Amino acid sequence: MLALAVGSICYGQQTEVAVSGGVSRLQNANIGSGGSSVGGVSLDDGFRLAFRLTLNPNLYFGHEVGYAYSRTGFVVGGSAASARTAIHQGSYAFLAYATKEGSRIRPFAAGGAHFSNFVYPGFSGLTGGGQAKVGVNYGAGLKFRIGEMWMLRMDARQYITGKPFGFPGASGALRQNEVSIGFGIGL
């Protein structure tokens, strides 16, 4: 139903809807110190689930909006993750394709902006239990047509965001790396 509604709104454009799963690897993940008795606090790696809507109004360019859910955890003083938590992310990316619309294989480069809601452990992002940060993202990927309207996609992207939660001693930017594979429909 959603696909039909989006397709009718975007008449004359190639529209794609996709879901992807993969890993979320964090770099510069130290988010500060939790006090002298606690030691350093960092976020660990986890899985990522993403939903993307792509509009391709041109043979070589497109626009993509998405939502992603990443699972992570707090690592306190170097021990194993002691509290699991989530990162909710809304994103926009401009896509530049190496091959024209209708090609069976379409390599692409992506760049854009996003916001990430880092949820406090034990809270819900829906009830205001998190902290939002904005950032930039970039990456590349491949889309493979496997039928008239079916496709596979692979993405490798990096999301650069400010450090969440305001712990003392946090410095630099958090870098979230996505490597994912997904399935989609081209309308």
Image: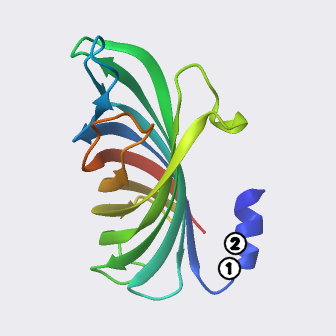
Q: Quadrant of residue 144?
A: bottom left
State the mark number for residue 135.
none
What number of labels is visible? 2
Q: Which residue is mark 2?
A: 7
User: Few, some or many C-alpha atoms within 10 Å of disc 2 (few <14, some 14-19, many ≥20)?
Assistant: some
Q: Quadrant of residue 43?
A: top left
> x and y percent of residue 122 in the render?
58, 19
> x and y percent of residue 93 in the render?
44, 69
Q: Nearer the viewer, residue 152 or 180?
A: 180
Q: Is residue 90 above or below residue 48?
A: below
Q: Is residue 171 above or below residue 17?
A: above
> x and y percent of residue 110 in the render?
34, 69
Instruction: Say which residue appears at 34% left-offset and 54% top-offset.
Output: 159
Residues at discs 2 and 1 in contact (Cβ within 8 Å): yes
Q: Left or right? Give the position of 78 relative to 147.
A: left
Q: Nearer the viewer, residue 78 or 66?
A: 78
Q: Nearer the viewer, residue 147 or 63?
A: 63
Helix, strand or loop at label 1? It is: loop
Q: Is residue 82 above or below residue 183?
A: above
Residue 101 visible in this rendered orientation of the protein: no
- The image's colouring method is rainbow
> x and y percent of residue 14 in the render?
55, 77
Task: Tell me the amino acid under the disc marked 2.
Answer: Gly
Task: Tell me the amino acid under the disc marked 1.
Answer: Cys
Q: Is residue 80 above or below residue 142?
A: above
Q: Which residue is mark 1?
A: 10
- Quadrant for the C terminus, please: bottom right
Helix, strand or loop at label 2? It is: helix
- Quadrant for the N terminus, please: bottom right
Q: Marks 2 and 1, how far apart in space? A: 5 Å
The single residue placed furthest to the front in the displayed view is 36
User: Few, some or many C-alpha atoms within 10 Å of disc 1 (few <14, some 14-19, many ≥20)?
Assistant: some
